[in-house]
Image (spheres, rainbow, N blue to C red):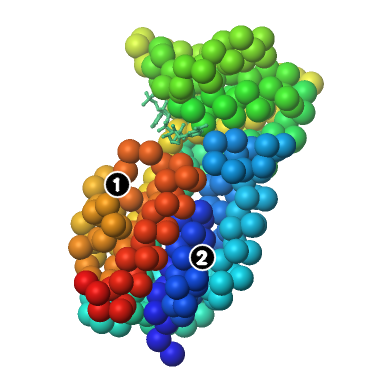
Amino acid sequence: MVYDVIIIGAGPAGLSAGLYAGRSRLKTLIIERAQDGGQIAITDEIENYPGSLPEHESGKSLVARMAGQAKSFGAERLADVVKSVSLEGGIKKVACAKGTFEARAVIIATGAHPRPIGCENEGRFIGKGISFCATCDAAFFEGMEVFVAGGGDSAVEEALYLTKFARKVTIVHRRDALRAAKSIQEKAFKNDKIHFLWNSVIVSVDGDGVMSSMKVKDTRTGVVTEFQADEDDGMFGLFGFLGYVPNSELFQGLLPLESGYIRTDEDMHTGIPGVFAAGDIRVKSLRQVVTATADGAIAAMQAERYISGLE
Ligand code: NAP
């Protein structure tokens, strides 16, 4: 069986594409390797998506409604990992662990993942002190000390969230000024629980089983300082919010990439006929839920035009 469109990724862009494709009566398959929602699945509160519920709309609840809506219009779902794609020609092939699926058009909505902290021993302590999701893991650090790496909107917003649990939150930033929006910065500067380590990068973490020490380098002087967990706590938390890395490894050599992101025109065309990209995977100036869903809608409508031979 040949689908009209295969959508790779079930974040806001992929689910919106699924809704529009299904509503256009295209035979649609959405493939997702992990949980629906991508990055917003781990966002505690979405307050800037128009129409989101005024009383605490979590990323999970918003995305669950998006998934239900795509399904109600007939989009099929597959939980699988895409291993490779063949994008040229009239029939595209998407090879997954469970089999190879064919479609006339493909919409790439694979998004991005958090950038690693990049320090020595990082892998050893993920889930044992290191986390990239405050919503998921803040509660483990109730009453403890935590560090947040980064200085953008995510780092500062999540640091504010962490103050509800931790007794002290220290933002470790490589420069002496935050990148975060001024309104978010103001809240952080006013919060007594938030402290800053300016011009600093984390070079290594260590511990016996759980993370209990960390070395931080001053980027101006090169001096390395070691932090030890409070004796009573035995460990501390480290949350990484250093921006994102595009999930584009499947498309290397197949599509032109710019710093790993896929370049499209404003109608989401990638340059290969019948292949579209939507959401955070694209080269774009604003990566938000509202821009991802808009991209998904445009990509699906353009896929429909392409399949009907209108372009
Ligand atoms: P971001 O804006 O790219 O910020 C990344 C931060 O990590 C920057 O402060 C950067 O430092 C630092 N950094 C990057 N690589 C590093 C490295 N190797 N070592 C040390 N520090 C490093 O990422 P984000 O905060 O995740 O936000 C991503 C996008 O989502 C942004 O467009 C943001 O505005 C948006 N966002 C919006 C909201 C909201 O509207 N409420 C919430 C969250 C995110 P430098 O500053 O020195 O470059």
Q: Which residue is drawn at 52% across and 28% down?
A: 155
Residue 133 position by quadrant: top right
- Of residues 98 and 88, the one nearer the viewer is 88
**Cα distance, mark 1 to mark 2?**
23 Å
Q: Residue at x 39, y 79 (%)?
A: 4
Q: Which residue is drawn at 52% across and 39% down?
A: 122
Location of residue 257 with respect to 67 vertically, above or below = above
Q: Residue at x 73, y 25 (%)?
A: 164
Q: What residue type is labelled 2?
A: Leu
Label 1 secondary element? loop
Location of residue 208 with respect to 277 vertically, above or below = above
User: Residue 173 in the image: x percent, y percent?
Assistant: 45, 20
Is any atom of residue 224 visible in this view?
A: no
Instruction: Give the class, few, some or many, for how many residues have Cα within 10 Å of label 1's Cα (few <14, many ≥20).
Output: many
Q: Which amino acid does label 1 sit on?
A: Val
Q: Which mark is residue 19?
A: 2
